[in-house]
Amino acid sequence: MKDSNYKQKAISILSVKSMAIMAMLGAIAVVLMLFEIPLWFAPPFYELDFSEVPVLISAFALGPIAGIITELIKILLNLVITGTDTAGTGELANFLIGCSFVVPAAIIYYRNKTLKSAIKGLIVGTLSMVVLGAFMNAFVLLPVYAYFFNMPIDALVSMGTAVNSSINNLSTFIFYAVIPFNLLKGVAVSLLTLLIYKRISGVIKSIVGV
């Protein structure tokens, strides 16, 4: 019985209607990426946006795989629209960081679709994003941006120092800028998702038939 349910879910995720929903939510996510909010504690290239909200809605309504597909659509559409300055490396890192938030949250929620599970999933997803985000920024994103923009990492760190005097090296940059940024983003996106999910999920499920 369980195997047939899993197969039915897999088929529903790959249906034309489901793919259309994922594409639409991915497109909405790209639009939301354009509306960025500067933060007082981080340099200007860290700005808050709510593009993960449609991705989370997709993952909660249709499952973790749908969340991954929607995240991929978002990244690819943004890549087509804005291009890349890092030969796709930055986009790949952002995709992985986004998935680190969405996938754990969706897995926990999808096993038991209750408000308690949703909150637990969002907490786990936020913490996962904070950890992976810190790692990816320290060892991938910041070095890659420094390389492609032909500047030392110290120049990026100094941009953090300009807004927070406690930032004086890469470690403090991660601790005082990157970690708070991803933590704030996770909390803000989680709260907004909780507020609007129920209103939207019913429409999605009625269209897809899950």
Image (cartoon, rainbow, N blue to C red):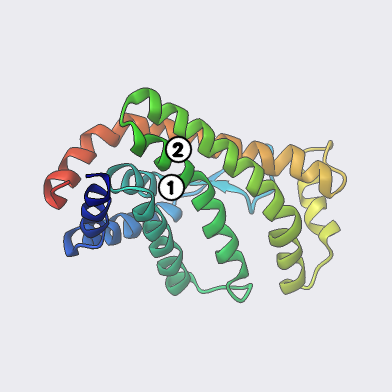
Q: Position of residue 175 (x, y in %)?
A: 76, 39
Question: For this rendering, which residue is in front, 109 or 43?
Answer: 109
**Location of residue 147 (image quadrant):** bottom right
Residue at 43% from the left image edge and 69% from the top image edge: 76
**Secondary structure of residue under mark 1:** helix
**Secondary structure of residue under mark 2:** helix
Most extreme residue toward the top, as rendered?
Answer: 116
Crowding near pointer 1: few (<14 within 10 Å), some, many (20+)? many
Amino acid of disc 2: Val
Query: Seen in the image, is 158 located left or right of residue 12?
Result: right
Query: Seen in the image, is 197 located left or right of residue 68?
Result: left
First in sequence, mark 1 or 2: give its number: 1
Would residue 6 be seen by someone viewing this image from the given angle? yes
Query: Seen in the image, is 137 located left or right of residue 117?
Result: right
Amino acid of disc 1: Glu
Discs 1, 2 touching: Cβ within 8 Å:
yes
Residue corresponding to mark 1: 52
Q: Position of residue 39 (x, y in %)?
A: 61, 40
Residue at 42% from the left image edge and 36% from the top image edge: 108
Distance between the alpha carbons at the discs numbered 1 and 2 = 7 Å
Question: For this rendering, which residue is in front, 94 or 166?
Answer: 94
The correct choice, above or below, for 30 with respect to 177 in the image is below
Crowding near pointer 2: few (<14 within 10 Å), some, many (20+)? many
Question: For this rendering, which residue is in front, 9 or 47?
Answer: 9
The correct choice, above or below, for 100 with respect to 94 in the image is above
Q: Position of residue 138 (x, y in %)?
A: 75, 53
Most extreme residue toward the bottom, as rendered?
Answer: 87
Q: Position of residue 91 (x, y in %)?
A: 55, 65
The correct choice, above or below, for 178 with respect to 96 in the image is above
Query: Seen in the image, is 46 located left or right of residue 9?
Result: right
Residue 69, numbered circle: none
Residue 189, numbered circle: 2
